[in-house]
Image (spheres, rainbow, N blue to C red):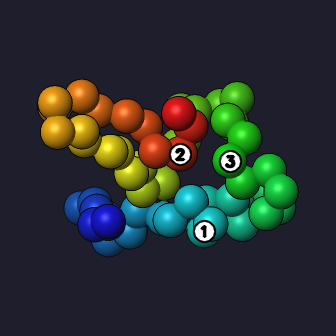
Amino acid sequence: MSRCTDDQGEVQPTLAELNRNWGRGEKDRLEPISNTHYWNAIQPWKIAKDGSITDVLFA
């Protein structure tokens, strides 16, 4: 997966980095976060042969 860098030099965090920054543990790492306004972690998607797209983390 690729990571983005914005014009301020901030690098898009991995999910593990985002959870660590928010004080979340390993056991709740895949639980949806209520305030998704600040969700900027790398988001993996699965693209099937038929072209359909699935959210890999929360599907």
Q: Which mark is residue 30?
A: 3
Q: Is residue 6 left or right of residue 55?
A: left
Secondary structure under tag 3 reads: loop
Q: Residues within 10 Å of mark 3 (few under 14, many from 20)?
A: some
Task: Look at mark 2 in the image and give the residue it sits on.
Answer: 57
Between marks 1 and 3, how big is the CA–CA gap? 13 Å
Q: Return the x and y of residue 53 as percentages of the image width and height.
A: 29, 32
Asked if 39 appears above or below 35 in the picture, the reply is: below
Q: Mark 1 or mark 2, which has the lower sequence index?
A: 1
Residues at circles 3 and 2 in contact by the CB criterion of under 8 Å: yes
Farthest front residue? 49
Secondary structure under tag 2 reads: loop
Q: Is residue 12 left or right of residue 33?
A: left
Amino acid, disc 1: Glu
Residue depicted at x 68% and y 36%: 33
Task: Look at mark 1 in the image and give the residue it sits on.
Answer: 17
Residue depicted at x 68% and y 47%: 30
Secondary structure under tag 1 reads: helix
Q: Return the x and y of residue 46 as percentages of the image width and height.
A: 32, 45
Would residue 5 be seen by someone viewing this image from the given angle? no
Q: Return the x and y of residue 55 as percentages of the image width and height.
A: 43, 37
Q: Nearer the viewer, residue 9 or 51?
A: 51
Q: Residues within 10 Å of mark 1 (few under 14, many from 20)?
A: few
Q: Which mark is residue 40?
A: none
Q: Mark 1 or mark 3, which has the lower sequence index?
A: 1
Q: Is residue 51 left or right of residue 39?
A: left
- Nearer to us: label 1 or label 3: 3
Amino acid, disc 3: Leu
